[in-house]
Image (tube, rainbow, N blue to C red):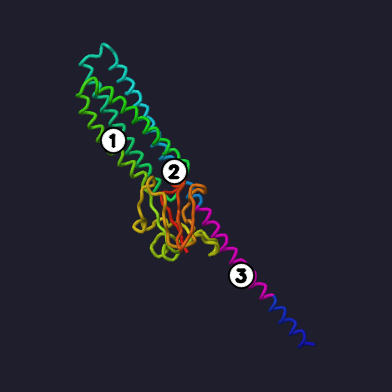
Amino acid sequence: MPKFLSLLFLTSMILVSCKEDVNNATTDTDSVDTVELQNRIDQLELDNQLKDSVINESLIFFNEIQTNLEAIGIRRREIQDLTSNPEFAPDDKEWVLEQIRQINFMREDNALKIKQLNEELDKNKFKIESLQTMIDGLMKDIEWKDEQINLLQSELDQLDSEYSKLFDAYQEKAIQVDRLKSEINTVYYAYGSEKELSANGVIEKRNGFIGIGKKIELKDEFNDDYFTKINAKNKKVISMDGERARFVTVHPTGSYELSSANGKTTLTITDVTEFWKISKYLVVVVD
């Protein structure tokens, strides 16, 4: 009997020990889960703060550009009203010239602000669709004002050839603006196998939960040199080696078509503005 009790006692101790081990393991796992979850929450809060900062800075640019556009419109109308007045005198010429100088300055300022705004959005890892839409709208407003200024140039040139000198300077500004527009239309693409893109500092796996479910994403500090630079308006078809293609960057469905044949995949961009509105970088994993 004592031998039986000893065996029973030993068995009970083993069961208790196993239960404690299980409880300890569960506690450790729960602890890891909690820390991982808190880290993700902290990162989301930080991301939201950064997004708010980008939006606030962008709105300042938008307001300044809109103010310039309104001022350009006012000056244009004032010039037209004065020069169409039969009592327009030679002494008024200097005032007109000064207004044209101000228009030139504001036009250049707008172009620089648009460039800064695009650069800010490009270097930030967040692609805020609504901001890109607003930029596109501002560009259309600027182009419309440009057309109005061109008409004003023709009207003033008929009054006095001396205005041509100032408009020559204006054309130099226009060339700068066209150059900036070209930069705005500049986009980048890179493709390759997952291993190749990872080895060249383009992509990485992250956002998994305890090592599970990680996704392939564009690195925050990716290797610019590995990308090919193109003009979005001119380059609408991209041919890639590999019959299967997966986008790493986000591009709206319906703005492109993919086709495969003879070991190659062809990307045809059917809606340029829509395709590039979220990201100016295209990354494709091909197999």
Q: Image point 43% across, 45% down: which residue?
A: 272
Kindly indicate whether the residue at mark 3 contacts the one at mark 1 (C-beta within 8 angstroms).
no
The quarter holding residue 135 reads top left
The kind of residue tagged 3 is: Ala
Name the front one of labels 1 and 3. Answer: 1
The kind of residue tagged 1 is: Ala
Instruction: Point out which mark residue 93 bears.
Output: none
SS for tag 2?
helix
How much space separates mark 1 and mark 3, taking CA atoms?
69 Å
Q: Which residue is mark 3?
A: 25
- Check if residue 40 falls in the magenta segment: yes
Q: Which residue is mark 1?
A: 174
Q: Which residue is mark 2?
A: 273
Nearer the N terminus, badge 2 or badge 1?
A: 1
The kind of residue tagged 2 is: Thr
Q: Is residue 180 above or below residue 222?
A: above
- Check if residue 78 falls in the magenta segment: no
